[in-house]
Image (cartoon, rainbow, N blue to C red):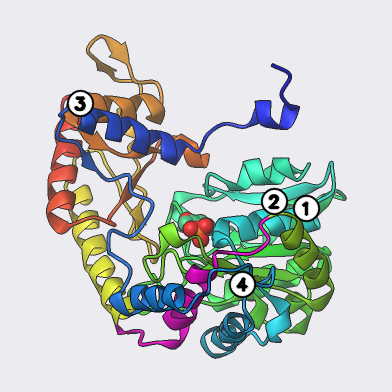
């Protein structure tokens, strides 16, 4: 069939692929333990679900404005001001079908064919294809384990060419959990301004940050960087609302009007009922969010400790998100059942098929030699999952 080059070049998300294979094994009766989850294991808090039920009963079942209901845009603007110190008029905010579509829309709005977009690696799996779908070329900016998987301003500066349009920032990061501090963000902002770059800052994991580390929103760091920053955030990770498909973005005024036209021609609007639930998520009690955060932090410490107990594995303590990103490079090149495990795709497949633990290969994020393990699962699953991982590695 004569499909477009765009379609033919696309590959499915590697994280979804792992989940599908694990689910297939599970269905075949295998007791699979998953450390592959990309979403909170908690249910959406009850008061948020109640708001959706009320919205449904009240008849909020029609199209809304493309950038969301005014009350929600106002609540987002208030949230960005009070939590993040970034001041936006409600009409500089657009509510979107998930944060993922907000990143997609931002790149559609910024990137022309042939433009380069700097993507720090390890990166979230969807950034490179999204850059390519906008006609751009991802340029990877490697970060190092010993630097906490953070790039610095000098490295950014060196990666800029005459074709660079934008850089994607993701703090805290999926998959590494890396989070940037205010001083390094100020230096990064200085480079972005001096080199005339846009910054798409994906702050989905803002609320999942631990050990007293403070999230810093790039757009809060002064007028100049504010004017070239698109802030992306959402409800999926903070409020355990992945299935609701609700996110948002905010940016400078000249960006927002054409963005609204883009949204009106594509998604029309995020689900009306989800928007009413999102409004209550932002304006209602935040105690459950804090309880989830505390539980994630305890699990993180538990998982990191267990991983450090495995001979040959090293693991940094990630400051945010709900993933660890242990280094398993020592095990690559070893053989299992006569087959050499050349990379983390082979290693993850071996761990899943032979030891029934699902992990995500680091190469999916552009980082060979690591596995992404999720602690968005119960403490018993963490203990048993890491035990299986250790047994699998020890058998190599
Ligand atoms: C989960 C995630 C998103 C978006 O999630 P939505 O469910 O689309 O809101 C965006 N960026 C990163 C890095 C994520 O992990």
Within 10 Å of the Cα at label 3, are there few (<14), some (14-19), or many (20+) other Cα atoms? few
**90 or 374, which lies in front?**
90
Residue hosting label 2: 118
Q: Secondary structure at mark 3?
A: loop
Between the C-alphas of marks 4 and 1, the distance is 17 Å
Within 10 Å of the Cα at label 2, are there few (<14), some (14-19), or many (20+) other Cα atoms? many
**In the rendering, at what x and y percent does residue 92 appear?**
72, 79
Q: Quadrant of the N terminus?
A: top right
Q: Nearer the viewer, mark 4 or mark 2?
A: 2
**26 or 314, which lies in front?**
26
CB under 8 Å between discs 1 and 2:
yes
Q: Secondary structure at mark 1?
A: loop
Query: Vertical placement of 92 versus 356: above or below?
Result: below
Residue hosting label 1: 160
Q: Quadrant of the C terminus?
A: top left
Q: Which residues are magenta?
A: 267-287
Residue hosting label 4: 185
Residue hosting label 3: 28
């Amino acid at each position: 069939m004569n499909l477009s080059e765009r379609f033919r070049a696309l590959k499915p998300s590697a994280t979804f692929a792992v989940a599908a294979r694990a689910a297939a094994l599970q269905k075949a009766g295998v007791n699979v333990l998953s450390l592959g989850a990309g979403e909170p294991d908690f249910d959406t808090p009850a008061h948020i679900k109640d708001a959706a039920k009320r919205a449904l009963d009240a008849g909020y079942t029609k199209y809304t404005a493309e950038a969301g209901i005014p009350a929600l845009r106002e609540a987002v603007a208030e949230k960005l001001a009070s939590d993040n110190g970034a001041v936006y008029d409600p009409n500089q905010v657009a509510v979107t079908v998930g944060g993922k579509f907000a990143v997609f829309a931002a790149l559609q709005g910024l990137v022309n064919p042939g433009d380069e977009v700097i993507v720090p690696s390890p990166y979230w799996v969807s950034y490179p294809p999204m850059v390519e779908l906008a006609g751009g070329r991802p340029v990877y900016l490697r970060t190092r384990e010993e630097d906490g998987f953070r790039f610095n301003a000098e490295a950014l500066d060196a990666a800029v060419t005459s074709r660079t349009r934008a850089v994607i920032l993701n703090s805290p990061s999926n998959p590494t959990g890396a989070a940037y501090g205010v001083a390094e963000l100020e230096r990064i902002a200085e480079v972005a301004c001096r080199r005339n770059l846009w910054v798409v800052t994906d702050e989905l994991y803002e609320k999942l940050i631990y050990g007293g580390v403070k999230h810093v929103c790039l757009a809060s760091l002064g007028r100049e960087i504010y004017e070239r920053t698109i802030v992306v955030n959402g409800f999926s990770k903070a409020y355990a609302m992945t299935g609701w498909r609700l996110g948002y973005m905010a940016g400078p005024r000249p960006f927002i009007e054409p963005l609204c036209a883009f949204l009106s021609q594509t998604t029309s609007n995020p689900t009306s009922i989800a928007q009413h639930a999102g409004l209550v998520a932002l304006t209602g009690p935040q105690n459950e969010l804090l309880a989830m955060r505390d539980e994630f932090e305890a699990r993180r410490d538990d998982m990191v400790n267990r991983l450090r107990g495995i001979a040959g594995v090293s693991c940094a303590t990630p400051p945010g998100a709900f993933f660890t990103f242990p280094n398993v490079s020592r095990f690559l090149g070893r053989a299992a059942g006569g087959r050499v495990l050349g990379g983390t795709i082979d290693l993850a497949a071996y761990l899943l098929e032979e030891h029934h633990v699902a992990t995500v290969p680091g190469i999916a994020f552009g980082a060979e030699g690591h596995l992404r393990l999720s602690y968005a699962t119960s403490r018993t699953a963490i203990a048993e999952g890491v035990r299986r991982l250790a047994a699998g590695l020890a058998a190599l």
